[in-house]
Image (tube, rainbow, N blue to C red):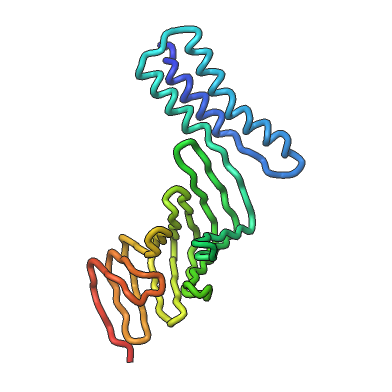
Amino acid sequence: MSPLSPLHWMKNLTKTLTSYPVSVTQETGILAHSDRFMRQILPLLLFYFLTACGELSEYDARQIQSTLNDSLIVTTESWDVEMMIMQEGETKLFIEGSYAINYQAEDRRFTKISGPVYVQIFDTTGAVETEAWSKRAVYLEEQAEFELFDSVRVQTASNRFLFSEYLKWSQNTDLITSPYDVIIITPQDSISGRGFEGVTDLSTYTITEPRGRFLVE
């Protein structure tokens, strides 16, 4: 059997370290903290050991550095989560979920929220303009975007409804979008199609591939 390359040693060690379960009970809190510390420090020690003991190819050095970047992720867990997005000193969006885990790496930061997820979007007067429900959500911090997944349901203050399996809200544009199938129901009619972009109160929207429209009597 041929010896493993430094890159394979690094990948195997990182896989082994990240496969250890981390307990969150109070009794094992110290051990969990120790596990997280070892997962962070051991890849670094191995990297310095390998570079000290032998020559690394440029390819192996790049791959090991990439593996190190992926392994150096700080996570924070929370239960009964409530998050607020502020805009110009006012609350723009409120979201709550049963559990969340925040990931922070050098090049990305995001939060995964487990449901049931509940969302409120506020208008300029501070009133609730739109509510939404889903089974899970992801907040992309650098992009300032919320993504809702699985059985997404939206209801506005003017009794407009949207149903989809995925929906994204952008803080920069204050628009909601979905590349997938949507159904919109208003007091006057209903429409279905694929590819959606609209304002948060559903008063104005565009469906790229409309499939049917029905008047509500």
Q: Residue furthest bottom?
A: 217
Q: Is residue 24 above or below residue 31?
A: below
Q: Name the residue rendered at 61%, 47% in the picture.
A: 77
Question: In the figure, residue 200 lies in which quadrant?
Answer: bottom left
> In this rendering, would 206 be left or right of 43?
left
Q: Quadrant of the N terminus?
A: top left
Q: Residue furthest right?
A: 27
Q: Is residue 60 above or below residue 195?
A: above
Q: Position of residue 132 (x, y in %)?
A: 48, 69
Question: In the figure, residue 201 lies in which quadrant?
Answer: bottom left
Q: Is residue 3 above or below residue 95?
A: above
How many callouts does the rendering have? 0
Q: Name the residue rendered at 44%, 66% in the picture.
A: 152
Q: Is residue 53 above or below residue 180?
A: above
Q: Position of residue 166 (x, y in %)?
A: 39, 61
Q: Name the residue rendered at 44%, 54% in the picture.
A: 144
Q: Name the residue rendered at 47%, 54% in the picture.
A: 138
Q: Position of residue 64 (x, y in %)?
A: 44, 23
Q: Position of residue 53 (x, y in %)?
A: 49, 7
Q: Quadrant of the C terminus?
A: bottom left
